[in-house]
Image (cartoon, coloured by chain):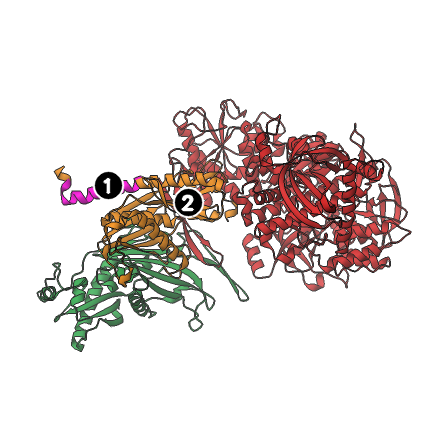
Chain colours: A green, B orange, C red
Amino acid sequence: MALCEAEKTFVLHGVEENFRVDGREREDYRPIELETNIVSHAFGSARLRLANTDVLVAVKIEVDVPYPERPKEGKLEFFVDCSANATPDFEGRGGEDLAIEISNSLSAAYKSPEVFDLTKLCILKGHKCWKIFVDILLLECGGNLYDAVSIAVKAALWDTRIPLVKSVTVDGNNVDMEVSDELHDCQKLDVTAAPIMVTVCKIGEQCIVDPNVAEELCSVGAVVIAVSKDKFSTVLQIGSGSLHPQTLLECLQMGEKVAQRLSEALTETLSEINPNKNQDVGFLK
Amino acid sequence: MSKNRELLSKIGLRQDGRRADELRRIRCKLGVFTEPDGSAYLEQGLTKVLAAVYGPHQVRGSRSKAQHDSAVVNCQFSMAVFSTGERKKRPRGDRKSTEISIHLRQALTAAIKVELYPWTQIDVYVEVLHADGGIYPACVNAATLALIDAGIPLKEYVCACTASLANNDVPLLDVSHQEEIIGGPTLTVAALPMSGKIVLMEMSQRFHVDHLQKVLDKALQGCKDIKSILDEAVKSHIQDVGSSTGWASTT
Amino acid sequence: MFTTKAFIKKNKVGNYLKHVREHYIRDDISCGLQECETCLPVESFLSPDHENKCSLFTSNHYLILDTNVVLDQMDILEESVIGNVIILHTVLNEVKHRSLPIYKRLCAVIENPSRHFYVFINDHHQGTYLQQNEGELINDYNDRCIRAACSWYINHAPKQKFVFLTDDSANRIKAQKEDIPSYTVSEYVQNLNTSGLTDKLSRKDFHGNDFTKDVFPNHLSNVELLTGIREGKLLQGTFRASRDNFLEGFVNVDSYEEPVIVQGRAGLNRSVDGDTVAVELLKEEEWVCPSEIILEDEGVGDESVDDVVTKENELQKATKKKSGAKPTGRVVGIIRRKWRQYCGILQGGIDGVYQMFVPADKSIPKIKIETRQAEFLRTQKLIVTIDSWPKHSRYPHGHFVRALGNIGDQTTENEVILLEHDVPHSQFSEEVLNCLPKMPWIITDDDVKKRVDLRHLDICSVDPPGCTDIDDALHCRPLADGKLEVGVHIADVSHFIRPGTPLDREAASRATTVYLVNNRIDMVPALLSSNLCSLRGGEERFAFSCIWEMDQNANILSTRFHKSIIKSRKAMTYEEAQLIIDDKTKQDALAEALRSLNKLAKIMKQRRLVNGALVLASPEVKIQMDSETMEPLDVEVKKLFETNSMIEEFMLQANISVAEKILEEFPDCAMLRRHPVPPATNFDPLVKAGRHLGFEIRVDSGKNLAKSLDEAVNTKNPYLNTMFRILATRCMLQAVYFVSGTYQKEEYFHYGLAVPLYTHFTSPIRRYADIIVHRLLAVICGADSTYPDLLDKNKTTELCQNLNYRNRMAQYAGRASIAFNTHGNYKMRKVTCCMSVKTPCKFLYHDMAWNVPYLWPKKAKRPIFLNTMKRTRHKKPEVWLFTLLTPL
């Protein structure tokens, strides 16, 4: 998408007036749709649609050996794939830069043990642990990818059911384990502290959240803030512009406020999901 | 595991309860995304595919690709890393994906009226969300819908289907992943069902020419059945879109 | 309707995958009742004409079975009084999952129209499909599905009566609450108006009262066993009972070179020969050596174990030695039972309903059964199966399955041999016979066009006397410039047996024709084996020909294969052919051809021997039968003529030529035959025996072995050489069929024949492997088409395993039959003698494969078999006392 000068001015004025092009105020989000357990053969999954940003997240698990320096911890890995469905620019390896940027920011946001407790994933200290693969598929880019991805990841992790380990036996170097083959015998992950990312975008003199594509093009700079409960887990400046320290501080405050709101809304939404109701809708809706 | 399993039980039912000549459940939807010019989602049994079409537009990258008498059809096949039972390492770029991309282009080029759009390019991207057998046919069928959604003129629908042979005798239609594992050869056919022309045929494993005819007939019948299902979906989609724009009330 | 099933499964590399499967629910599945008007008509054997006569009910009824009923009471279900049975798909799947043999038996019953069984696909039926509840165990879920199907039937056809049989009391109570008439099998069977059926009830519900003392230690639970094995505290292995000592057995553990000895009641702890067991090793100071005493179970059916205790003490004394102790352990649990049906007789002199069954196989313990017809059964050979072995019982509990016939009857004994060797020998089914060509069979012009017409050639066959399944014929004619054309013509069986037909499946399952002394169990129906495929003299037959051009020195100049039509001039015996060759006055074409063939064969044989082929004799014993009574009259060692080896040479050459051809065309899926080089240790007994008698037998290569065997001649004892050769045969490994793609090229070697490539092509009437080879060759010649299984490496490997197994069993069965008849021959002339046999000698003559020890004293003309006689230990340790049944 390319904007001409007049269009940019229009967007800028809208932000200034606290009446954005699509009628929102500066701290408003576009409508979000969330659906969990959408990929039946994954251990957990979620699809999030934020206006026309579309993200599909699936969680797969494997049995792995813990890192020698952290024998009591499991592993968590993020992988982002930018589908060419979103834009022809992503064809081939075109989306790789963006993908790596997003997956790195997620790894950073989830790194702290207070955010996500990896010791829960340990099966046998130093020998066996679960490795969780969080695979994120970007299906459509309508702006504000970080926020959408982080919410979808949190929801997918919330949805994840890790099979219950029934027994672990050690025989020399050989570790054998047995897992319950009943699907409902499972362990759920604690995601209360999982971070939510909010992108705060500076347009003109003002900051907004949830920029759409046009607004992203007008922005001089943006900060992605990952908030876990009431703490920041990562702050990341993106875009080519520069920000004044004072502005940065304002951005952080705004981000935290919005993140709390989002987090509450998400918790409420997730609690409304009835696991027994077979929705089976997905992309057919 | 597969040793004691049979493709077709003595009572005539397959592992999943279908009869030999039955397709899996097909559900589909056109226009699932706003960004692409055309998009579609298709489920064939548990195999789930998203397709997006961009174009016709100016040829991207090197201009030398452009053709003076027809549009260039560019296809990319990609599988989500979580789409298979075991997690894949890469979504695309491996041999199999490249091969499917090429086959996809072959089948779609045969159906699109490419001569209408010289010097242009049409991009077709398919993304497999769940692979449960018959990936290629599902991709072709989804791509057809996406092309229709994009309003690109086609000669006719292009549909694809697989067929196999059970007990050396009975042709099986639309094999699932489980049936692929149990064994038996798989014949994949992409066809223009209305004229009955075959645009692509591929066979895994050797099987004797004597059986080819009946398996092929079955696969072609499958393509025809799929065509009518897709046609139904297209009609209801147009009805929906049309009524929301108000033309339904005028009739 | 559509639903999915999801489950987690471990994959090969140890990861856990979540699988999702589709599951379609249908509205077009029929109930199978003939009276039903709502369901779609479907082929169903259920019939209102069949009546289940059970006094519990006033009217006729249909039966629905629980899984446990099928698993435990298959012998009852095989009785034809029970009919109109509805087998639910849930039950069928569960049975298949739990026990494949039972599943196969059930399928056989279901397929029999006269039994009136019907399979109802309840799990895909919209009225009876249930979703598994969260937290519900799979067994509970299946039970719920079964009950739901019962209720559905009751509502679906209110005019009919349905009875649910289950031995699971919890399920029965639940079913009764849901108003489903439910009974246990024994309740039902006891009220059937058929006598004798109760004998066949499986008895699992033996509960000893608390006062009875346990005879055996407890078994560990499954979990304990698995953990123990995983942690290396316990060893897993196959239990092999000793044939001579009922208180001793061995456990073959993979990781141990020597088997682990288990002794005494507590050591064996209810293992039965063949079971997979877990053993715990004893401390090294408690190890014992293998006993050499014979202990027979002389129990008479009561539960007292006093006599066993005495024998245990005796055993302990005999085996407690300081030196030579071997790893010893005790069985602590059974991982998998290998119980099957056993042949045998009832022990005499026991009154009451509880009888003792003595299996023919000495390694199986006596089995306690309950019967009300003991008097009659005592005259019969029986089949009995084990149901359970509770720890408070000295003997396993079983039930009577069926009687085979009077003890001592030739037919009964044959039946025993066939059953004990797992030889399929039932009549060919209607389905199979339908695949046969319709008679009269004529050769059409179409056939002639597709084949090379060789009817003008002077072809003849040479076989043993009385042979009716002639599968090979030969011809030889001179060509220009002194060359010879030699043809081997093999019956074209694959023309009649088309892949995938019931006939083909049956033949593949039988794998080989089994020859007993007075009976032949054909692989293919007689119409083919003795008529259409038999290359009889003077009749036009289809053949698969292998034709060589040879020079006078038997060098092959060219080879070709094609299908042909032949007309054999004469079917000769070896003796007849020999006479023609020897009779110089005969100058006709046939006689000349035979002479040339004989000459070539001699050159070929010589060349083969030079290459290191082994000539291994095995005592081909011919038993002359009285044609009326079918009693054996005399035993004679078969005479061998030059013509025997003439035929053999050409068959070998044909097999080799074909093997080369099919491997060339199908490097991945050719069916070949290999004979592995035996490990040097296998030859130890032979080398030892040779040294004992003053010969050096070299075993480092086939060539040297052949040479040293040739040299091991003692002019005073002409049988000695034969004996060495027999012994050498026993040291060999079995030759086996395999698929070319599954082995390295070097391993294709056939040790016995000393050829790099070999297969079986020449006897398709009696060997299934040959049929496969024919099909491969036919594809190469363009005479026939392939089919997927033929080229599927895995399928063919599976087939090879069956062929190898059946071949081995057929061989054993044949020997057992000879052994039985040899003894039978002399049963009237009982001779008692005492003889001393030193240990090496005993070993020397102990023929493992025949299952019988035999002696071959210098004076005797032939070996003496000892298997049914009593062996007792003399005061001197190295002397055994034998009661001989064979005259010297």
Q: SS class of the residue under badge 1?
A: helix
In the figure, C524 relative to A56: above or below? above
Side (left or right) of C216 relative to B218: right
Mark 1, residue position = B235
Q: Residues within 10 Å of mark 1 (few under 14, many from 20)?
A: few
Q: Quadrant of residue C155?
A: top left
Mark 2, residue position = B175
Observer-nearest of A176 and A104:
A104
Residue farthest to the front, as pictured: C481
Residue C94 has which mark? none
Which amino acid, by three-letter code, is at mark 1?
A: Lys
Can residue C378 be seen?
Answer: no
Quarter of the figure with the C terminus of chain C? top right
Q: Residues within 10 Å of mark 2 (few under 14, many from 20)?
A: many
Observer-nearest of C180 and C40:
C40
In the figure, A19 relative to C2: above or below? below
Side (left or right) of C78 relative to C875: left
Quarter of the figure with the N terminus of chain C? top left
Q: Give x and y (percent) for residue C828.
A: 85, 35
Q: Dot 1 falls on which chain?
A: B
